[in-house]
Amino acid sequence: MLDGWVPWPEPFARRYRDAGYWEGRPLDRLLRDRARTDPDRIALVGADGARWTYAALDARADRTAAGLHRLGIAAGDRVVVQLPNTDAFVVLFFALLRAGAVPVLTLPAHRESEITHVAEMAGAVAYAVPDLLDGYDHRALARTVRAAVPSLAHVLVAGEAAEFTALDDLDAEPLELPAPDPGDVALLLLSGGTTGKPKLIPRTHDDYTYNARASAGICGFDQDTVYLVVLPTAHNFALACPGLLGTLLVGGTVVLSPTPSPEDAFALIEREKVTATAVVPPIALLWLDAVEWEDADLSSLALLQVGGSKLGAEPAARVAPALGCTLQQVFGMAEGLLNYTRLDDGHDLVTGTQGRPLSPDDEIRVVDEDGHDVPPGERGELLTRGPYTLRGYYRAPEHNARTFSDDGFYRTGDLVRVLPSGHLVVEGRAKDQINRGGDKISAEELENHILAHPAVHDAAVVGMPDAAMGERTCAYLVPRGPQPPTQRELAGFLAGRGVAGYKLPDRVEVVEVFPRTSVGKIDKKELGRRIAERLRAED
Ligand code: J2J
């Protein structure tokens, strides 16, 4: 067993096994099983158009697993994976599972600050990167990260490896490797974060397989499903809700899109006759407009899943007429709980709610600021526990003590209202986080970076309303000295510290003093109101 994570208490584990949610099979089996029953079906269409049958993908994962084993990557080892939507991601993901190693999934946009922390936190032995991505050299990043994290013995590169190990060279005769315990951690996902440093989310073989399988069921996925990966494959939504894993589990075909742009995605939808995909609201808005000028044939598309941040009712109502498909709203989290509108839900539920829980055993509580349950239908913070929701972050006992109730409910930080049908409406947030079109930014993490700037005395990061993204990031600064940084200077400073691009503040506001609450904390609500008002005035 991996140490440092919090398993479900035995009575719960027994219940989830007895109910059939946890099947007791390692996560990689979903590929193995299909390779046996449907060897010649197409499992994957790679970013370069390469077509992989189930048998070929399975065999390649076996050979890479043997290569990893030979390299010295052992059961229980953590491996940071930072690969874009390419065949290499899919092969390496399954190969790591088969070698008994634990993939730690990060986004291509992450930089030195995030990766170093994650690699350290995970005690990772290896780090997998592309060579170049959008002109950025990930091998240079790997050199920096490796110098900072002594546990990293290997850097694995998709493409030109320089002094490192090429993923393509991890190729050896398949071995009988011992199967992992299905109750153990299969992978670690990155949390959106509300604290100074990102947290890692342990997902087990049992819970993640259930996550993918039950999601595939609700979304009506089957062998005829052609799923387009538009969001980063490393994101929980595109990976397992039902995503790549749910599609492979039912024997469908996964198509990888290099970017979410309408040009790339629409061309692939037409060429591969894609039936389903998942996007965040800003991409949905872009696609709704792009149908006006892109003349691709989207008639195969039957389902568009939208989640990650709130989709407005107005754009929601435009999806079916403009794209000719069913809309499904998804309110999910890498921590576990998934809410889906159902395919047969009426118009009002689909456009006006963020869905209802996936599992009959998802337990939901909605509480006020004192932790008391609110009357039915009223707004409060969503707490949840269930068969695929974590019981604690990896190696984070103090944070866990605050983030989980004594009886194991995860405090989501989301403010919701529950309708009599069980559907949830997301009404806001009680956590100090900015949701920039689905990308999550921890205010505290960003403030800590900003405070390192020599001309900044104090900093407070808040969200500001934005038509396309839902919100963007505004950094309020109290200057030290006469020359506080401009937005551009601050962004340059933060990028120089290795902060991911999506976290760089979109705007800087300089003030003499911060407004304070009655207990003396920075009044972020007031700052949020001020910037919203200023934006209205500028309009
Ligand atoms: C409002 N807020 C939402 C929605 C997520 C599927 C879909 C999304 C994610 C995801 C995911 C929202 N309306 N429809 O993992 O499998 C906000 C909430 C939530 C946080 C989780 C999936 N859908 N959110 O977004 O781990 O605040 O997962 O707690 O990135 O996103 O973020 P993340």
Image: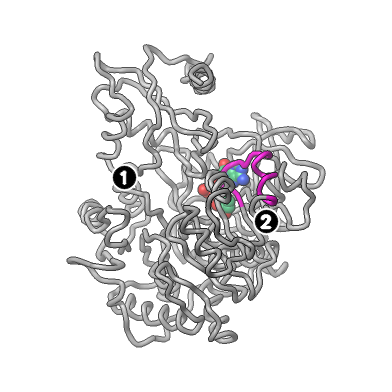
Q: Are marks 2 and 1 in contact (CB under 8 Å)?
A: no
State the SS at label 2: loop
Residue 166 sits above or below residue 433 on the image? below
Magenta-drawn stretch contains 68: no
Relative to 482, 46 lies left or right? right
For the residue with label 2, is its CB less than 8 Å from the closest atom of ligand 1? no
Residue 274 point in image, percent of width and height? 58, 66
Query: Can you tell which of label 2 and label 1 is closer to the viewer?
Result: 2
Residue 132 point in image, percent of width and height? 28, 59
The amino acid at mark 1 is Ser
- Of the numbered discs 2 and 1, the one sitting upstream in the chain is 1
Q: Is residue 509 visible?
A: yes
Which region shows up in magenta?
306-321
Task: Give me the residue at 72% from left, 41% from top.
Answer: 352
Q: Which mark is residue 113?
A: 1
Q: Which mark is residue 324?
A: 2
> Quick one: label 1, few (<14), some, or many (20+) residues within 10 Å?
some
Chosen colour scheme: one colour
Magenta-drawn stretch contains 316: yes
Relative to 127, 86 lies left or right? right
Depth check: give the residue in front, 24 or 330: 330
Residue 32 sits above or below residue 476 on the image? below
Task: Give me the residue at 31% from left, 45% from top.
Answer: 113
Residue 55 point in image, percent of width and height? 49, 84
The amino acid at mark 2 is Gly
Relative to 165, 511 lies left or right? right
Depth check: give the residue in front, 5 or 247: 247
Depth check: give the residue in front, 255 or 445: 255
Q: Residue furthest top?
A: 512
Question: Would you identify the image quadrant in which residue 429 lies?
Answer: top right
Residue 286 point in image, percent of width and height? 53, 46
